[in-house]
Image: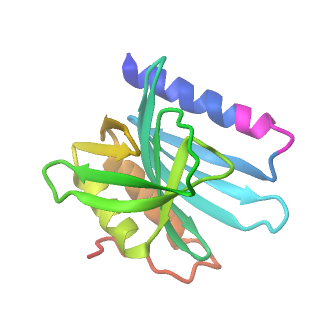
Amino acid sequence: MPTLLIAVVFTLIASLAQADTSRTSETKDMKTYGNCITFTERDLFTDEEYYTVTCGEETLTDATAIGIRSQRDGLYVILSKGLQFHLEDQVPVIIRVDKGPVIRRSADWDRQNPRRAFIQDDHLARRLLDNLANGQRAILKVGDEGGNIQLDGSQRAVADFRHRASLQPQQTLEIPARAC
């Protein structure tokens, strides 16, 4: 039942995003794999396409998500934890998948979405792709807020993301099936 609720929430968010007339991009080809999703986003000005895989869990009062986004200029790690108010441009983050090493970094706040922080780091994104695909649970902390995510369907979602990114014509990065 929780997986169905998560899929419904992701679908509602995507349909609301598509209906938002202030957006300059459109979301298409969304696929749900357990509590992970992949989708393509097309910039309405340039027709460039960006690919995203994200895994998350949401309750009535909280949301936790981790994902990777492929853009022309590189790979981004996207993190989200609840609704946060911030005064700084950056926030400390901690990530751990299963019993793997603890990753401590500084992330930039997404000015368009105050719930999200991101890190532009190809090496870290590739490493997390492997960890998410093979992991059972991700634990993250964004600022003072922490949470964890069961990685149900992550292997299929990451495979879909890698397939989409490999088809990206303007992509200058190669995303191998196994990185690092």
Q: Which quarter shows the C terminus?
A: bottom left
Q: Find the residue positioned furthest to the front.
A: 87
Please say if 166 is above or below 2. Answer: below
In the image, 148: left or right of 52?
left
Residue at point 59%, 77% (across, down): 73
Residue at point 68%, 64% (across, down): 49
In the image, 98: left or right of 52?
left
The percent coordinates of residue 107 (x first, y second) are 46, 59
The percent coordinates of residue 162 (x first, y second) are 44, 64
Please say if 140 is above or below 160. Answer: above
Q: Nearer the viewer, residue 105 or 68?
A: 105
In magenta, the rendered stretch is: 16-22
Residue at point 81%, 53% (across, down): 24
Residue 30 covered by magenta stretch: no
The percent coordinates of residue 86 (x first, y second) are 56, 44
Quadrant in the rendering for residue 137: top left
